[in-house]
Image (cartoon, rainbow, N blue to C red):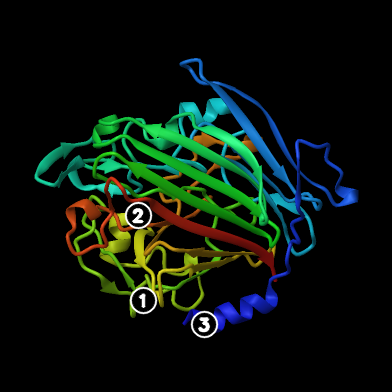
Amino acid sequence: MLKTTSRGLRRAIVPLLLASAACDAAVDHAAGVATMKRESFGTTPSGEAVDLVTLTNAHGVELRAMTYGAIIVSLKVPDRAGQLGDVVLGYDSLAGYVKSSPYFGAIVGRYGNRIAKGKFTLDGADYTLAVNNGPNALHGGLTGFDKVVWSADTMRTAEGVGIQFRYVSKDGEEGYPGTLTATVTYTLADASEVHIGYEATTDKATPLNLTQHSYFNLAGQGDIMSHVLTLNADRFTPVDATLIPTGELALVAGTPFDFTSPHAIGDRINADHPQIAFGGGYDHNFVLTRADTGLTLAAVLKEPTSGRVLEVRTTEPGVQFYSGNFLDGTLTGKGGVVYAHRTGLCLETQHYPDSPNQKTFPSTILRPGETYRSRTVWRFGVE
């Protein structure tokens, strides 16, 4: 499975050699200095100020994220010729994200993914959430974590330069119990990696499932059908017609969901399979094959034209592979690019969808006195 693929990847990836940070200093790439820059990015319709933070290394590798939704606005990494390109979808300004965004680059929560019929029972009490995706609740509700302004601090660590976002979600917000304090940290590390760290505490038991919802296109243009994907998962969670898991952990072997060896995304995306029909392509949670609770290889994504490679590792038990099926050409993104069908894909590290209603799934309940911790690493390279 991935063991051979991963070993080959380690030989092939060319490190980007991210340098150490110098806070708020002038950019001096020739001198090998990394920087952090903070600036205004506008205001929300309610008048809240939004800031944009840019992390840059000595070679020009750049991550830009804003306090609205803790959204990664752009991520520029080199191709095999050394040319930098933006590999995530999004908008040039705050207005696009506020007006209409399918969670481009955002942190989603309290509960990433779907909860059936917007209802769950916890410790004998029934809770009702906003229904915003057919009959179900999706990604935290009408005003989820992707649509609020987070506080943010820049930082320098042994790993590199970073941003720590913080948001306090009040008891009852979007129907969820408990006042939840969440922090999300993006670190542009020295080893061509983006480290995403999550922590949270609560004063009442509550479901929690945070994830990062960037849409990747490693070519920087066109669709993602020729991207080659490997997933470290021999099972997935089949769904019903409303994309709620049935509770089964089905084997991927012999199905279009078998990415245990590399496959171009377009190879089987239109296969005659009921799960493909339900998702309009891939929009499914894959159950990661894990040896322990530490960082586990979840996915390897390659784009043959640019040579770019993305390796995803996580402490989470699952990853949602979404192939951009609902992008339909109605959104115009950065640089005036129209986001057509399957222009980007998501690899959302997560607990399983609808876990509060699925007793056999790993629990997503955070209780007072506990600290939620999760970690995901994106490693970029070329081959």
Left or right, residue 217 beside residue 36: left
Which numbered dot is residue 280?
Answer: 2
Q: Earlier in the sequence, mark 1 or mark 3?
A: 3
Q: From this viewpoint, which residue is outermost toward the right?
A: 30
Which numbered dot is residue 3?
Answer: 3
- Gap in angstroms between the C-alphas marked 1 and 3: 13 Å
- Gap in angstroms between the C-alphas marked 1 and 2: 21 Å
Residue 293, image x, y percentages:
40, 69
Which residue is painted at 51% across and 48% down in the image?
214
Q: Earlier in the sequence, mark 1 or mark 2?
A: 1
Residue in the foreground of this view, choosing between 241 and 43: 43
> Please, what secondary structure does the residue beneath circle 3 have?
helix
- Gap in angstroms between the C-alphas marked 2 and 3: 30 Å
Which numbered dot is residue 234?
Answer: 1
Is residue 130 visible in the rendered image? The answer is no
Which residue is painted at 50% across and 79% down in the image?
2
Residue 54, image x, y percentages:
68, 39
Q: What amino acid is found at the position of numbered circle 1 in the picture?
A: Asp
